[in-house]
Image (tube, grey):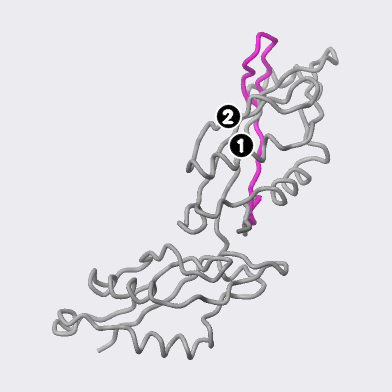
Amino acid sequence: MRKFCVMMLAAVVATGLTMCTSKTDDKVYDASVDSIRQELSAMPEYPGGNEAMAKFLGENLKYPEKAQLSGIEGRVLVSFVVETDGSIGDVNVKEGADAMLDAEAVRVIKAMPKWTPGKNKQGETVRVLMTCPVNFALQSDDEADVHASYPGGNEALAQFLCENLKYPAECEAAGIKGRVLVQFVVTSEGDIANPIIEKSVDPRLDAEALRVIKLMPKWIPAEKDGKKIAVKYHAPINFAL
């Protein structure tokens, strides 16, 4: 399964760079300290700049399939050293989100091409520790070029809900009604995954809404740039007497 949003992400992968204390015996250059930053004549730079780096991450980052199916999102903060020859070393997770996301973030950072290394005022190349946040976020169906859809359209979906939704007897007797808002993932294969309650009315109505959502057949998946993608979908389930 392919990724469908990398935050930068739009997906999209948002990237930002900061420089931290180097873990070497060489002179330490810490860009968070103004007085030390002034000693540098050049910061390390990805070839082509931050936009090129964002493009690289967007094209190479793969959203783990199991994370998609589980609706797992989050930001992974990765540290890495830009060596004096521009190569990338000492890649580590500083702040993790999930083991699957952490591993993918580390993999893609290690795959980066050589950078232009940093230099001190004497023109000497220096090793510098950088940090980069890699955000994993599922796209909303609203962001897709072709929206996810129930087979047969909204009328078929309405009919499915009418035929399968059962009003809890206790709620009906007590006059409890309302709209339960459910979020779920429509995977790139059309499967329904990770349904959760976004807006609750009553635990019994919530449970029934989740039960029916889990019964739904495969959907027609959403598409972005001509490719099928997984998306977050929001569905209101109305209970009315």
Where is residue 215, by image quadrant? Answer: bottom left
Q: Residue at position x 24%, y 68% from top?
A: 203
Q: What's under tag 1, amino acid-wise?
A: Val
Q: Which residue is mark 1?
A: 106
31 is within the stretch colored magenta: yes
Question: Residue 140 location in percent, x, y?
Answer: 55, 65
Please identify the quadrant where the C terminus is shown: bottom left
Q: Residues within 10 Å of mark 1 (few under 14, many from 20)?
A: some
Q: What's under tag 2, amino acid-wise?
A: Asn
Q: Residue at position x 60%, y 59% from top?
A: 1
With 130 as the anchor, is 77 left or right in this view? left
Q: Which residue is mark 2?
A: 92
Q: Residue at position x 64%, y 24% from top?
A: 90
Q: Is residue 80 above or below residue 161?
A: above
Mark 1 or mark 2, which has the lower sequence index?
A: 2
Measure the C-alpha gap from mark 1 to mark 2. 7 Å
Residues under numbered marks 1 and 2 in contact, where contact means CB atoms less than 8 Å apart: yes
Q: Is residue 200 above or below residue 113?
A: below
Question: Residue 175 location in percent, x, y?
Answer: 18, 84
Label 1 element class: helix
Label 2 element class: strand
The prevailing secondary structure element of the residues shown in magenta is loop
Number of numbered discs visible in the structure rendering:
2
Q: Is residue 111 above or below residue 126?
A: below
Near-viewer residue (178 or 184): 184
Q: Is residue 79 above or below residue 155?
A: above
Name the outermost residue toward the right. Answer: 123
Near-viewer residue (218 or 24): 218
Q: Residue at position x 28%, y 75% from top?
A: 208
**Range of magenta residues:** 8-32
Question: Residue 133 location in percent, x, y?
Answer: 60, 40
